[in-house]
Amino acid sequence: MLDAEIKGLDELNKRLDAISVDLRKKGGRFALRKAADIVRNAAIANAARLDDSQTPENISKNIATRWNTRLNKRTGDLGFRVGVLGGAVKPEGKLASLGEISGKGKANPGGDTWYWRFLEFGTKKIEARPFMLPALQQNIDNAINAFIPHYNAAIDRAIQRGEK
């Protein structure tokens, strides 16, 4: 019979937990933002082709990347959302049937672009001209390829800090 005792496992587990927390909080969030920004930039380029230069509103200026706090609080997972500012709000007021939110969205960089969803999804009267979905579909590989090196670098930094 062979007995073995490994000393230092508690310290190793503490260090691994510290690395895990650091990666999730800092390194993972940074790498995920870099990936989301690739999708955002593609959506901006797609929306710029649809924007009417005759109007002061500009959908492409309202496309933003935002931290998904709700997902993080509920599940602990990291997540970013790419969307149009002022976009998914319940319509109220006289023009609610059209989807306009009275007075909201005017402070956004691109103005009040409540109508973006009509372009993206279409209506009974106009055909859909999506710009958000293709931005994601055409850039999934690019986003993954951007995420991996940033996350690997974060892992390396966490390991180096753990060794000190």
Image: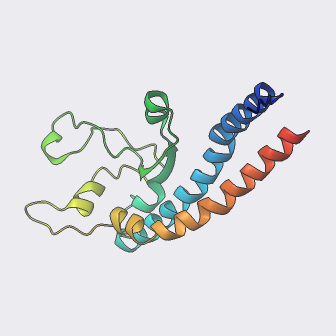
Q: In the image, is 139 to the left or to the right of 121? A: right
Tell me what residue is drawn at x 49 percent, y 70 percent. Answer: 141
The one of 157 and 101 positioned closer to us in this rendering: 157
Residue sitting farthest toward the front: 1
The location of residue 29, given as percent across then percent down, is 61, 45
Does the image show residue 58?
no
Residue 91 sits above or below residue 40 on the image: above
Q: Work out which quarter of the rendered image holds the N terminus and state it.
A: top right
Does the image show residue 69?
yes
The location of residue 157, given as percent across then percent down, is 80, 49
Occupied quadrant, residue 131: bottom left
Residue sitting farthest toward the left: 124
Tell me what residue is drawn at x 46 percent, y 65 percent. Answer: 44
The one of 158 and 10 positioned closer to us in this rendering: 10
Q: In the image, is 74 to the left or to the right of 34? A: left
Occupied quadrant, residue 122: bottom left
Residue 15 sits above or below residue 158 on the image: above
Residue 162 sits above or below residue 54 on the image: above
Tell me what residue is drawn at x 80 percent, y 45 percent. Answer: 159
Tell me what residue is drawn at x 25 percent, y 69 percent. Answer: 129
Q: In the image, is 150 to the left or to the right of 35? A: right
The location of residue 96, given as percent across then percent down, is 17, 40
The location of residue 118, given as percent across then percent down, is 22, 58
The one of 47 and 3 positioned closer to us in this rendering: 3
Occupied quadrant, residue 130: bottom left
